Amino acid sequence: MQCGKERFCWEIEGIRVRDYQTETPFSKSVTVKELVAPHEHDWAFTHGGGTQFMCMLGNGSRVIDTFENQEFVETLDRIHRQLGPMESRRVLDLALNIETSHLARSVFRFKKEEPLLTDESFRLWYQTKWEYAKFELSNASN
């Protein structure tokens, strides 16, 4: 996964009747910041159903909540703005990985109701969150 766009496709008895792509808050953000280069899409299936059966959930269901989470997207924007593209790319890589997307979404989310932080306080907040993410990743690999 590279950008977080969504694709909707409907088929009736094997005939495609509708197929379109749409931006998510996440895909808009990473496109504007040029964190994602032009690419071919490799769609990850999330869910669906047919006339006689229900399809299994695919691995795309693990990342869709991240792509649609406005708090996460706003935090990624702030990381990019205050800490630069290298740091936002690190968080983006976590978010795009099916195995770690949930971790990125839960750790790197600055809630609006929290007080505004100065630049230095935000850097410390980010460093603390990154250390926690590394801790969780190391525990997951053991």
Image (cartoon, helix red, strand yellow):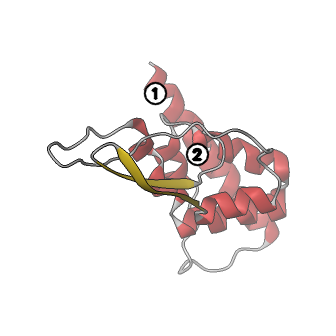
Kind of residue at badge 1: Asn
Kind of residue at badge 2: Ala
Q: Which residue is mark 1?
A: 139
Q: Secondary structure at mark 1?
A: helix
The residue located at (46%, 52%) in the rendering is: 64
Q: Secondary structure at mark 2?
A: helix
The residue located at (65%, 58%) in the rendering is: 27
- Left-right relation of 55 to 93: left
Q: Is residue 80 above or below residue 112?
A: above
State the residue in front, 93 or 68. Answer: 68
Dividing the picture into quadrants, the one containing residue 74 is bottom right
Q: Is residue 39 above or below residue 114?
A: above
Q: Which quarter of the rendered picture does the N terminus lie within?
A: top right
Q: Which residue is mark 2?
A: 95
Position in image of residue 123 (x %, y %): 76, 58
Q: Which quarter of the rendered picture does the C terminus lie within?
A: top left
Q: Is residue 67 above or below residue 138?
A: below
State the residue in front, 55 or 107. Answer: 55
Q: If you read the primary sequence from the N terminus, does the residue marked by circle 1 or circle 2 appear first?
A: 2
- Left-right relation of 49 to 139: left
**Dot 2: within a 10 Å radius of its alpha carbon, few (fewer than 14), some, or many (20 or more) residues?**
many
Furthest-left residue in view? 52
Dividing the picture into quadrants, the one containing residue 62 is top left
| Label drawn at residue 3 | none
Position in image of residue 75 (x %, y %): 65, 64
